Amino acid sequence: MGYLSQASICGTVCAMAAPASEAASPVPTDIVEIEKCLTRVAYLAGRARQHEYLMTLAGLSLDRAAVTILRRLDETEPMRPGVLAGLLAVEASHVTRQVQRLERGGYVVRAADPHDRRAQRIELTDAGRAAVERIREASRVGMCMALADWSDEDLHRLAGLFHRLVDDFITRAEIPADLGPTA
């Protein structure tokens, strides 16, 4: 399988964005297969049963939305609830409810925004950081089990390609946070 050229990708993107009346170039087979695989991976990783197993391994009882918020906060600096909602492409009220639960559980705290004292930012507590590490460790156990038969070379190549995929999605395909979940 060869790599798609930049021109091929641009042609495909332009064709996809073109009005329906114009003839569109077919999407390359590799892109179709990648989309199918990513859809399956997202489904497998997001199943309720998988989440329950992950929480059992981590020794926690958090719902999927709470885990998503904790993981996102662990990857960034403290942020306002509205900004977090935009990054997660969910309604602000959803984040507010989850943050209240996480706050009661001792995983996050609200602190005054140093740039605007009227606003608050959400940040992880030590317990929140410890919970994220337990979740990540449990997730790594599952990865090790799934990829046990892969060579070190294949794992290294896959990691590099995943980093590249994520970077390219962020650069070229991610919906801007300020457009919100309905845009």
Image (cartoon, rainbow, N blue to C red):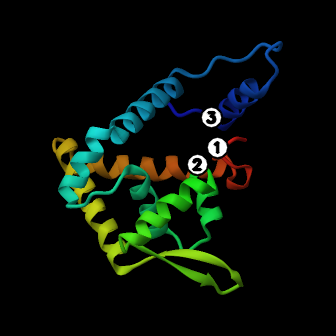
The residue indicated by pointer 3 is: 5
Task: Say which element carries label 1.
Answer: helix
Amino acid type, callout 2: Asp
At x 51%, y 24%, the residue is 32
Q: Residues within 10 Å of mark 1 (few under 14, many from 20)?
A: few
The residue indicated by pointer 1 is: 173
Amino acid type, callout 3: Ser
Task: Identify the image quadrant of residue 150.
Answer: top left
At x 71%, y 81%, the residue is 118
Q: Residues within 10 Å of mark 3 (few under 14, many from 20)?
A: few
Q: Position of residue 117 (x, y in %)?
A: 69, 85
Residue 168 is labelled as 2
Q: Position of residue 57 (x, y in %)?
A: 18, 55
Q: Position of residue 156 (x, y in %)?
A: 32, 52
Near-viewer residue (10 or 45): 45
Q: Are marks 1 and 2 in contact (CB under 8 Å)?
A: yes
Near-viewer residue (42 or 143): 42
For marks 2 and 3, the one nearer the N-term is 3
**In this rendering, position of residue 149 left or right of residue 18:** left
For marks 1 and 3, the one nearer the N-term is 3
**In this rendering, position of residue 29 left or right of residue 12:** left
Q: Quadrant of the C terminus?
A: top right
